[in-house]
Image (tube, rainbow, N blue to C red):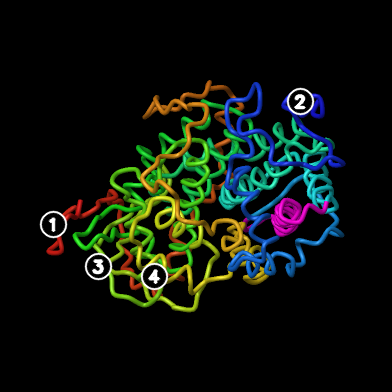
Amino acid sequence: MLKATGAAAGAVGIGAGVGAGPAAAAGTSYAHPGLLHTGADLARMAAKVKAGAAPYTAGYAKLTANRHAQSGWTANPQAVVYRGAGSPQNYQILYNDIHAAYQNALRYHVSGDSAHADTAVAILNAWSAKLTQVAGSADRFLAAGLYGYQFANAAELVRHHGDFDLGRFQEMLSKDFGAVSDDFLVRHNGAVVSNYWTNWDLANMACVLATGIFCDDKAQVARAVDYFKHGAGLGAIKNAIPVVYGDGLAEWLEAGRDQGHALLGVGLMGTFCEMAWNQGIDLYGYDDNRFLKGAQYVAKWSMGGEVSYTANTRRKGAIGGWSGSETATDAAGVDPNFQRPIWAMIANHYTKRRGLSATYLTQIAAKSAPEGGGGDYGPNSGGFDQLGFGTLAFTRDRAADPAATPAPAASASTSGAGSDPRPQSAATASASASPAGGDLAATGSNDAIGWAAAAGITTLAGGLLLVRRRERVRRGGAE
């Protein structure tokens, strides 16, 4: 039973305060809280706001003004959540409730007002008691990935609450989100591995990692970390950031698509790296700070700066079925005023934790501050892709030892590259099946028309392989 599990882990009731919890709860594999926010992070936010320190106060004001952060929020759980064409879409209900749970939980840790913790727990318990499936077209994988990692982060903030049904929530998260995302990374919905753009992989990678940490599943965390380093899909770091230039910038593949999706991908990779860092795994610095170079590239480009782009061809389609390819030849146009709340986390890591220079990240983070969250960037799903509030949550003082690596947590093996280490069963295999008639076109040829014109992409016919032109670029260092 859930509460027994919480008590065994050293949970405290709400009357005594939820608390940050121990750095590593007894009997667990990972530090809790330890997804996007550690106990030290939460204590820093509370202390800075209490002291009236800028820019924390401005970030907290964004939180308290958001309608999702109010303790009167009432959950509206659904048995089945649908996302995608051809289904009675109701996923908006889910993401609004998740953001209400997260914002109330975060507000509790800053203010100490237990009404907000109680509200977050009530929302999370209501969903774990009712949800049975995430369904729909191919977009169900986006729903599982995006809302899975967000659900885990909201729940991580109240996992030590005496009324939180931890075991039931872990079961729901694993079955209805983690398993779906895990399967996507193995089978990609029956498509060729490059059919789905970078952000699809990254959303599901974030879900797998967050679920693994939340549920203390070392094997799941290992799969997520290994995929980041060596995965075949476009979310693996060397596929998402395929060319490193001599000016210290590195091309973000989806910049050849459009600005919105490129920013989404950068935010998701930052989220992945931050959650790993808080468990002692440094992916921010992996491959000579490759993510820093890619994030700097996107920051410069998004502010209207000129960037290089090496043409590439992406193969798409179903395995053994229809196929085609698209070639991106240049970085898409941008709106310098377009924002997602992604930059504070990344900029503060590299400049404050590591003491590195990151001019473009610093500039765009300042331009975006104070960052809000879900509900501050429009009512549609894109405004809820990130949890946000980075100005409050991730502003840091410079580390005393910027060269320090993350504090070690329980180790997670990253071996086992290449194959799917999960037991293969009928249930596992059926999870990847597409609806009758298939639904790959949702992210294949049908969406090409909309973004090709805006991004300057030429669509080619035929079944060409994904070929990255790894030619030498005059500015050096391309691979």
Label located before the other in sequence (1 or 4): 4
Q: Residue at x 65, y 72 (%)?
A: 378
> Disc 1 to disc 4, how far (Cα)?
26 Å
Q: Residue at x 62, y 65 (%)?
A: 53
Residue 452 is marked as: 4
Q: Position of residue 341 (x, y in %)?
A: 55, 64
Q: Which residue is mark 3?
A: 308
Residue contact between numbered discs 3 and 1, judged by CB atoms under 8 Å: no
Residue 88 included in the magenta stretch of the image: yes
> Which image quadrant is residue 54 in?
bottom right
Tell me how many marks there are: 4
Q: Which residue is mark 2?
A: 5
Quarter of the figure with the N terminus:
top right
Q: Secondary structure at mark 4?
A: helix
Residue contact between numbered discs 1 and 4, judged by CB atoms under 8 Å: no
- Look at label 2 and name its amino acid: Thr
Residue 126 included in the magenta stretch of the image: no
Residue 472 is marked as: 1
